[in-house]
Image (cartoon, rainbow, N blue to C red):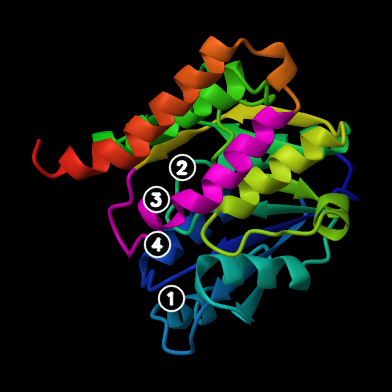
């Protein structure tokens, strides 16, 4: 691969503590693409920072980026503004498994893809260890968006993703919370006809640190882009399929959470 292909690896962190070292070690051992790492944090007392500052030696330039907004969305948007590479990967702060696919993601970007999506739901990928309610929500949304809306990835809601520089500079982000920006940029890029690739990835429920994934709180924002994805396909869908999708989504987002704690 050409050394001209560079990555900014953007990692939003929140009280990761010493666990961040395992992730950095994993990146250092597996990524050969010329890269730098942007650690995006909320406040100066975050337990992650002392372990990042003391981390050496590192084959990457390490940059600390303080959140100019609020929450994980603000941290990632701040990281986007501070990024300069031709491609940016949003990488989970607890992922010590998937660094080995970043070079291939960079190659796919170099082949002309504006988005490269690690996929938990294609052959070779997996999603393990999370609560069945979360798994049902994510898998159902992914199934509908791929098979009914026609998005070119089996895992359209995954926040772990590579974005080209032109996506970051040319597509305004309207979402204001969570990881909804990721599906927003995906569906907007598809509307423009920009190329999307996917690659198998594995996912295991976080065991250390604090997760900021709040599916019910962020659901209204996700739903906006869920339905946006269907707009260009409505003429090709039968009403039966469309109504079934709405009923399934309602059951999973409204009814299921009410009974989840009772099961």
- Which of pointers 1 and 4 lies earlier in the amino acid sequence? 1
Q: Secondary structure at mark 3?
A: helix
The x, y position of residue 193, in whole percent, is 87, 31
Disc 4 on helix, strand or loop? loop
Q: CA distance from mark 3 to mark 1?
A: 24 Å
Percent coordinates x, y for residue 202 in the rendering: 45, 33
> Do the CB atoms of the residues marked 3 and 4 lie less than 8 Å apart?
no
Residue 212: assigned label: 4
How crowded is the residue under tag 4: few (<14 C-alpha within 10 Å), some, or many (20+)? few
Q: Secondary structure at mark 1?
A: helix
Q: Is residue 254 left or right of residue 258?
A: right
Q: Quadrant of residue 192?
A: top right
Q: Is residue 161 above or below residue 197?
A: below
Q: Earlier in the sequence, mark 2 or mark 1?
A: 1
Which image quarter holds the C terminus?
top left
Q: CA distance from mark 3 to mark 4?
A: 9 Å
In the rendered image, the residue lying farthest to the bottom is: 44
Label annotation for residue 215:
3
Disc 2 to disc 1: CB gap under 8 Å: no
Find out whether residue 208 is within the magenta segment: yes
Mark 3 or mark 1: whose residue is earlier in sequence: 1
Which residue appears at 38% of the width and 80% of the height? 47
From the image, give the main secondary structure of the stretch colored magenta. Answer: helix
**Residues in magenta, as a range:** 205-231
């Amino acid at each position: 691969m050409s050394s001209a292909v560079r990555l900014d690896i953007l990692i939003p962190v929140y009280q990761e503590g010493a666990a961040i070292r395992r992730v950095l070690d994993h990146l250092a051992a597996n990524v050969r693409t010329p890269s730098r790492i942007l650690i995006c944090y909320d406040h100066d007392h975050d337990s992650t920072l002392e372990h990042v500052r003391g981390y050496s030696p590192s084959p990457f330039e390490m940059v600390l980026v303080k959140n100019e907004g609020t929450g994980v969305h603000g941290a990632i948007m701040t990281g986007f503004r501070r990024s300069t590479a031709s491609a940016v990967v949003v990488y989970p702060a607890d992922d010590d498994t998937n660094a080995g696919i970043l070079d291939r993601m960079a190659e796919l970007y170099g082949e002309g893809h504006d988005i490269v999506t690690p996929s938990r739901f294609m052959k070779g990928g997996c999603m393990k260890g999370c609560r069945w309610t979360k798994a049902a929500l994510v898998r159902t949304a992914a199934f509908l968006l791929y098979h009914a809306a026609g998005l070119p990835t089996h895992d359209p809601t995954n926040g772990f993703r590579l974005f080209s520089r032109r996506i970051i500079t040319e597509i305004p982000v309207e979402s204001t919370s969570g990881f909804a920006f990721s599906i927003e940029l995906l569906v907007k890029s598809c509307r423009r006809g920009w190329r999307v690739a996917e690659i198998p990835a594995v996912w295991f429920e976080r065991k250390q640190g604090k997760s900021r994934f709040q599916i019910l709180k962020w659901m209204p924002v996700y739903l906006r882009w869920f339905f946006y994805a269907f707009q260009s396909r409505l003429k090709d869908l039968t009403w039966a399929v469309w109504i079934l999708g709405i009923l399934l989504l309602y059951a999973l987002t409204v009814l299921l959470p009410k009974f989840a704690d009772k099961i």
